[in-house]
Amino acid sequence: MPGTGRGGQAVERGVARTALMVAAARAIETHRPDSLARDDYAEHFVRAAGTCESWPLRPHEVPAGDDDPLWGRLGRYFGLRTRVLDDFVLRSVRAGARQVVLLGAGLDTRAFRLDWPEGCVVFEVDQDPVLRFKQDVLDNLAATPTARRVPIAADLRGDWETALGNAGFDPESPSVWLAEGLMLYLPGDAERRLIDAVDRLGAQGSAIAFEVKLGSERPEVRSSAVYSSAKQQIGVDLLTLFDAEPRPDSAGHLESGGWVTRVTTPFDFARTFGRGPEPERDDALASNRWIFATRT
């Protein structure tokens, strides 16, 4: 079904195209012998997009393996991030939260592939074309969610809180929030508003995980093979998609509001699992931070 589906063309351009890049990486990760995360839906999104026919979806289709800057190094990063956030959200709901909010949900399939406790609801917030493309692919697969799933078409740069409330979100009950690969592309003001909203809506017992980049990258880092390979191989120019404004201290803001925060690097988890990217010279991943916060 290449090129089919409502919203198919929109998801193949700009920031939305990065969701397809991550989906391809998840497909490759799924079929690795030492896989950290499994997503059997991921490859179907890539196949449904008309401009991604040449993208690899299996490890053997990446001849250089982990030495390939895009599908090896960055791909393993996405696989590691998927596993870490899977573990985080499952720990949070098993601790009692029953509302999960995926901010910039993209082609996330956690509502379908995770083993949710009874009574969980997963709110997926993203722009309408992305959600429509995703729904078409899932409908063609006759996919059935393992939790109650509520897609919410909204722009995270605007008023998405009203739509979330109208969809049944309860600010008096604990909630879990994921912003996976989102903050990198948001203007600073939009990130501040988003964190403010989570601070307002996150009741006691709530948790959030998100990813940021610290500071501006040196020219040597901006010319790294990770960035150039993404641009050359699949037409994704991450450097132009990343917002160049100074980033707010979102972790510090949450901490000042009573959240307990933990700031980590992806390399911390690569060491924990024994898989994933290791630091290298002029590293495009060196400034990435994964932030976890809970309201106790």
Image: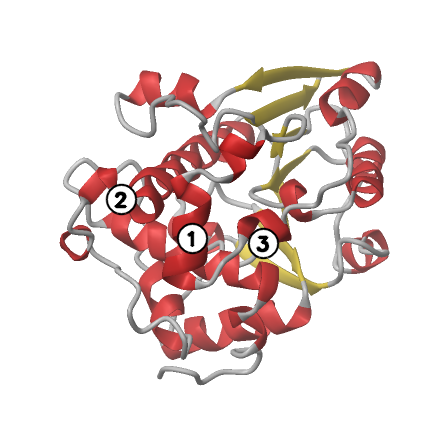
* Residue type at numbered disc 3: Ala
Image-based side of 48 in relation to 33, left or right? right
Name the residue: 64% across, 42% down.
184
Q: Where is residue 8 in the image (x, y as percent from the top left)?
A: 52, 78
Q: What residue type is labelled 2?
A: Asp
Judge whether residue 122 can be spotted in this image.
yes
Mark 3 vs 1: CB contact within 8 A: no
Find residue 230 and name its label: 1
CA separation, marks 1 and 2?
11 Å
**Kind of element beneath mark 3:** loop
**In front: label 2 or label 3:** 2
The image position of residue 210, as x and y in percent, is: 61, 34
Could you tell me if the residues under marks 2 and 3 are in contact, i.e. CB atoms within 8 Å? no
Image quadrant for the N terminus? bottom left
Instruction: Tell me whether the residue at label 1 lies in contact with that at label 2, contact meaning CB atoms closer than 8 angstroms.
Output: no
The kind of residue on which mark 1 rests is Ala
From the viewer's perspective, is 225 left or right of 151?
left
Residue sitting nearer the eye, 145 or 235 = 235
Q: Which of marks 3 and 1 is nearer the N terminus?
A: 3
Which circle's residue, 1 or 2, is located before the other in the chain?
Answer: 2
Label 1 residue SS: helix
Q: Residue at x 75, y 24 (%)?
A: 204
Secondary structure category for the residue under label 2: loop
What x and y, as percent, mark residue 117? 47, 40
Q: Where is 134 relative to 240, above or below?
A: below
